[in-house]
Amino acid sequence: MAEKNTQKATSASKDNIWESGRKRFGIRNLRRNRNSKWSFAGQQPGEEVRLVVRRHWWFLMRPALPVFGAFLLLILALWGVTVLPGNVALWGSIIAILFLFLLGVAVWFAYRYLVSWWYETYIITNKRIINARGLLQPTRQQTPLDSVEQVGLGMDSMLGLLLGFGTIHLYLTGGDLVLREVPNPKKVRDAIQGITDEVKAKKKPEAPVPLPEDPDIAQALKELAQGKPVPQLQNADADLPPLKGENERFHGPRRTFGGILRIPTDVRYTSGEYTVKYVQRSRYVLWRNESAPTAALMVVVPVTLLMPSFNLVTGPFLGYWLLFMGLIVLGLLITMGLIYMNYVDDVYILTNKRIIDINRHFVFFFEQRIETEYKNIRDIKVMVPNVLERFLDIGNVYVQTPGENPDIILQSVDHPFVLQDEISAIRGFKEKTDKVKKENAEKKSMEVWFGTLFKRLEDTTRSRGAPDLRFKDLLIAMEYAHECGLEVSVWGESAASPEIPPGCVLHQSPPPGTLMEPGSMIEVVLSTNQPAPVINQIQY
């Protein structure tokens, strides 16, 4: 029995050593213990592994194609030996070469791709999400679950929809974490959301700010700690209807494309990012582009109607004429519609973090997107191409960035100089907001600091300060003083009002609340019914 207990203790200690992270080297980054629960090096006390996620197996298929090809060649060679007998030595050499080739390709695939795929894991526990990767040079990134604000899910391609893999976007407090090419993403999303809600429900509320009992001091602290209002940019999506499943998908602009088709854009916002303004090109651009097909339509329609009326087209050619001209009219109408859709779907999005230029061609066939962050902007210039656009207050806004960062040109927009100022204001907004938030945080810290200090002083004064002996009988006052380790000395007597009986303390020195050393003396003046001496009533 003792041997069994010793063996159990030894195995438990080994598990604890493995889980504590003190293990020097191991092939496995995860293992199951005797209770069929996952454990890993560096696991914290009370931490449980809820889910282990790796990339979808499909992403091993393309690197494994050479292995499949070498294996197929080996099978064909073996089949050739049986079907086409000949020189045995030649066939043996071919088979040996193909076998060695298969072995080499398989080893390279395992070393280069399989090991990387296997050791790139997302370990989801009841406390954090750990992204571990690498065998010989392991790296680890961890994210606490209490910093997760929202979980988004998205399918990046039709293949992902068919095979069941997608992307999980975690919007964190001050950052983002993206889990790409995750199998069964809905299950992973629900698991993370459930664990996050569980963690936040167990989170202890913040301790209240200690306030002194003195109402004047407490009010003064509240006034000094009153923070400045944090400036806010307008949210252009506030008035737009929410997208279907908006709370479960990636954050992005609510503006859709394609008119009634309501095609959402693939722009993915980061944590804390939102739309400040949508900028459309001037209607002058639409009128200019529509002028040519409109003029052609105004010519084609009368010609189509007048040619038969003047008997210029008669007989069997009339039907062909009307069909031909009808196709031209239809083509012009479709051209005008496409020009309008391309105009509507060319949008510049100003967020609180970056500028995005979306140029969608023919509704959904092609989308071109250029973006740059405000911190990368070097200069903002405005150029008006011609006199007509100057009178119409239309121009081009050039957002220039250094190096290889893409420049963005907001072409033919209304009120370009106003837009230039707005971009500059948004660019400096983050710095202004951070400054106000920093000041408010400092005030909050000072409120806690001074509130704790004054509260401690009040408690100390109450426990160690001079007690309030006023209007108490002398014997009772002496008992109060003795409880605090102090002595009482009668300094004199003074006449009091009829409501105060004689022998009560009228005045004391030092006053109540004064910090005193143990054994110190409190001098008191007692009340008496005798009138005060005349000399005391003289006013100097």
Image: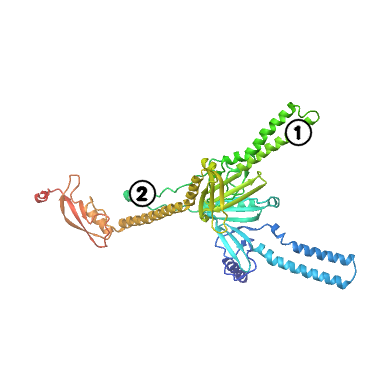
Q: Position of residue 241 (x, y in %)?
A: 57, 40
- The amino acid type of the residue labelled 2 equals Glu
Percent position (x, y) of residue 65? 75, 61
Left/right placement of residue 383 relative to residue 112 reads left
Residue at 70% across, 66% down: 110
- The structure residue drawn at horizontal position 68% and vertical position 64%, both measured from the top left corner, is 113
Q: How many marks?
A: 2
Residue 467 appears in the rendering:
yes
The reply to whether discs 2 and 1 touch (Cβ–Cβ < 8 Å) is: no
List the single residue furthest toward the left: 534
Residue on which disc 1 sits: 323
- Amino acid type, residue under disc 1 in the picture: Leu
Label 2 sits on residue: 223
Q: Is residue 511 left or right of residue 132?
A: left
Instruction: List x then y, in percent, for residue 269.
Output: 57, 50
Within 10 Å of the Cα at label 2, are there few (<14), some (14-19), or many (20+) other Cα atoms? few
x 37%, y 49%: residue: 222
The front one of 408 and 131 is 408
Q: Tell me if residue 87 comes above or below residue 393 in the rendering.
A: below
